């Protein structure tokens, strides 16, 4: 009976005699994580450059680790992070067991396309040279941080069209990776663009981890669909797209 159900789900390819339904690739799992509480979240101060985590944010990251160390951290194959300080710190404190099992900090992938949307100082990253001098981040491969990654111009512009394109690149990047279980640590607004394709006011808490898979293996947009919520350690703190920020988005 088990063999019949597999064959019904995965019909054999007559052009490939070696095809076996048992080795058919499983659906890819993506764990989208919003960073823990950062300084700009507390008083809606969007002018803190590359805002770092607060003391509470550090605590939330430790709680995130406790919530996931016996679940997703056991079998995640790749960890990808926005290169802003609050996301890298969330990554290091929130997923230490997975980082260690994957080979250490040097195995983290920094993805500039996953940076936050707006062009306020709080959503603008730091220069590579500055980050490389910070003891917390030493050992992370920062070769992906090109000089323009902090420019908020061109492909990193805060314009809605550019943001939609950037979110699509993130989805395509994740789908094209060979790993089947991937964690992405990013920001409230860009996560909404990644999931919904546009700015959205739906809540996404600090240190909230949502589980997704891809709707299709070949659609150009690489849309995601949610499966579950893995963890939620913080509150739905405001982003710089909140109405009081006066942002155009």
Image: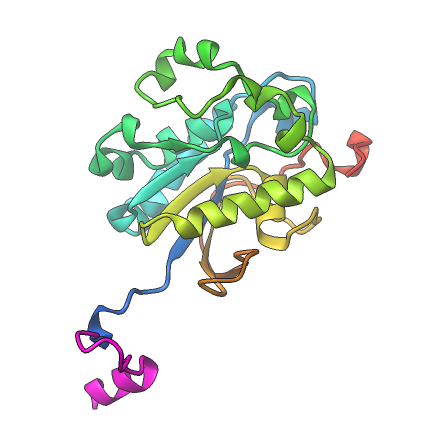
Q: Is residue 52 magenta?
A: no
* Left-right relation of 186 to 18: right
In the foreground, 216 or 108: 216
Q: Image quarter for residue 43?
A: top right
In the picture, the quarter occupied by the C terminus is top right
Most distant residue in the front direction: 15
Image coordinates for residue 208, horizontal then vertical, percent: 50, 45
* Left-right relation of 85 to 19: right
**Above or below: residue 32 compared with residue 38:** below
Residue drawn where x is 47% and y is 62% of the image:
218
* Left-right relation of 161 to 195: right
**Residue segment shown in magenta:** 1-19
Residue drawn where x is 38% and y is 35% of the image:
94
Most distant residue in the left direction: 18
Image coordinates for residue 168, horizontal then vertical, percent: 57, 48
Q: Is residue 16 magenta?
A: yes
Q: Is residue 15 visible?
A: yes
**Above or below: residue 182 compared with residue 20:** above
Residue drawn where x is 62% and y is 30% of the image:
156
In the picture, the quarter occupied by the N terminus is bottom left
**Above or below: residue 138 compared with residue 205:** above
How many discs mark residues in the rendered view?
0
Q: Image quarter for residue 48?
A: top right
In the foreground, 146 or 70: 146
Q: Is residue 236 visible?
A: no
**Above or below: residue 221 compared with residue 188:** below
Image coordinates for residue 137, horizontal then vertical, percent: 37, 19
């Amino acid at each position: 009976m088990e063999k019949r159900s597999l064959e019904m789900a995965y019909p054999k390819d007559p052009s490939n005699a070696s095809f076996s339904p048992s080795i058919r690739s499983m659906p890819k799992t993506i764990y989208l994580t919003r960073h823990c509480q950062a300084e700009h979240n507390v008083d809606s101060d969007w002018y803190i450059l590359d805002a770092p985590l607060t003391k509470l944010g550090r605590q939330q990251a430790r709680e995130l680790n406790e919530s996931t160390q016996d679940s997703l951290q056991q079998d995640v194959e790749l960890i990808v992070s926005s290169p802003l300080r609050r996301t890298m710190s969330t990554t290091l404190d929130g997923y230490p067991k997975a980082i260690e099992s994957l080979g250490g900090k040097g195995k983290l992938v920094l993805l500039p396309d996953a940076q936050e949307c707006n062009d306020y100082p709080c959503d603008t990253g730091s220069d590579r040279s500055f980050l490389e001098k910070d003891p917390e981040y030493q050992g992370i491969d920062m070769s992906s941080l090109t000089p323009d990654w902090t420019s908020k111009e061109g492909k990193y512009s805060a314009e809605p069209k550019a943001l939609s394109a950037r979110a699509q690149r993130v989805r395509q990047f994740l789908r094209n990776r060979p790993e089947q279980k991937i964690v992405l640590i990013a920001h409230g607004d860009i996560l909404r663009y990644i999931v919904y394709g546009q700015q959205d006011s739906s809540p996404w808490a600090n240190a909230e981890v949502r589980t997704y898979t891809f709707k299709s293996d070949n659609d150009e947009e690489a849309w995601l669909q949610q499966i579950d919520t893995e963890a939620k350690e913080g509150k739905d703190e405001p982003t710089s797209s909140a109405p009081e920020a006066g942002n155009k988005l």
